[in-house]
Amino acid sequence: MKRWLNVLLLLALLAVTMVLLRDHFVPTGHVCRYNRKLCLRDPPLAGADVEELQLRLRELGFYPGEAHGVYDELTAEGVKRAQLSLELEPSGVAELSFWPLLYHAEERTQGVNTEPPPGKVHIEIYLDKLKLVVFSDGQEYASFPIASGRPATPSPMGEWRVTHKNYRPNDAFGTRWMRLSVPWGGYGVHGTNAPWSVGRVVSLGCIRMYNQDVELIYPWIPLGTSIKITGDYQVKFRLPMARGQVGQDVVLVQWALRGAGFDPGEAGGVFDAETERAVKSLQRLYGLEPTGIVDESVFAFINRGEGEEWPPK
């Protein structure tokens, strides 16, 4: 009996330990959400989609309030005024089909190089420039404006692969969707039913494009295509960092190791065997114990400071 009690106590201790360390090794999974049908409710609907709608209504002169992300009476009145201007029934309900009607411009942005690239394609996305560039055999072929993640929900920097593609029938993700190999959530490159958001920092982390633009490049990009995302936002580093850890800070450490001359392989956000070998190589060079763990000593050799452009040049 005592033996079984000891086993149960050990299992309970293990479970508690896993819960405490979960965020250290596997960040909370990210999922891009659909735009919801927005209407007055009790309690009121709240979220980033409400805030985005309020911002757009305010830009168009239909909503005089603050973009606080709560669908209240004032927001519903703004929707009604917009609906009246569009000769729609003033229901005060923002259906999915309502969003594209708030855009009043041409969505197509690429005027040249509309034929498929002749060489091997890879993509680079520059968050600081809000731009996606298609390369053909290493040469820039075409570029497009994007929307990126808000500061609270940033787009993932790193070296990713396209793992899944599908058509979206003009829902909140527009008309095309390409999922990336980000290990901590469901990020992708996709179209949008809110085209006014392109050129802004407003998404939940995904990369938005005009529907016509994403439709153009969609057939150019086979599964497995490399998509590199770079930026300059601040990231909190979790130290010590060791094999098995996953996250945005791991990507930046991998880039920093490469910049210091120690190749960790593809910067895919997982502290794997290649990253561990790179850390050990650095430690040996500087006379440190080759533990393969990024502690304060290792970090001092590779840290470039937060808020600078990544990856290092």
Image: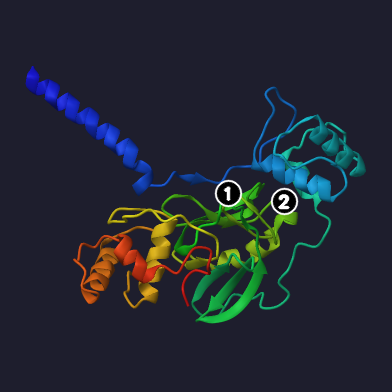
From the viewer's perspective, tell me whether residue 162 is left or right of residue 284. right
Q: Residue at x 23, y 28 (%)?
A: 12
From the top left corner, tell me how far across and down residue 156 is, in percent: 50, 58
Q: Work out whether residue 238 or residue 262 is closer to the camera in this orientation and state it.
A: 238
Q: For residue 152, which numbered disc appears in the image?
A: 1
- Residue 4 lies, with reference to residue 176, above or below; the image says above
Residue placed under numbered mark 2 in the picture: 194
Amino acid type at circle 1 is Ala
Camera sees residue 266 = no
From the top left corner, tell me how far across and down residue 1 is, in percent: 8, 17
Q: Residue at x 42, y 58 (%)?
A: 249
Q: What SS does tag 2 mark?
A: loop
Neighbor class of circle 2 (other Cα within 10 Å; few <14, some 14-19, many 20+) is many
Q: Residue at x 27, y 32 (%)?
A: 15
Q: CA distance from mark 1 to mark 2?
A: 19 Å
From the viewer's perspective, tell me whether residue 197 is left or right of residue 300. right
Q: Work out whether residue 126 or residue 91 is closer to the camera in this orientation and state it.
A: 126
Q: How is the image coloured?
A: rainbow
Q: Point out the residue furthest to the top here.
A: 1
Q: Residue at x 56, y 50 (%)?
A: 153
Q: Earlier in the sequence, mark 1 or mark 2?
A: 1
Q: What SS does tag 1 mark?
A: loop
Camera sees residue 201 = yes
Q: Work out whether residue 165 or residue 93 is closer to the camera in this orientation and state it.
A: 93
Quadrant of res 86: top right
Amino acid type at circle 2 is Ala
From the top left corner, tell me how far across and down residue 264 is, in percent: 32, 69
Mark 1 in CB contact with mark 2 (< 8 angstroms)? no
From the top left corner, tell me how far across and down residue 145 is, in percent: 67, 66
Between disc 1 and disc 2, the foreground one is 1
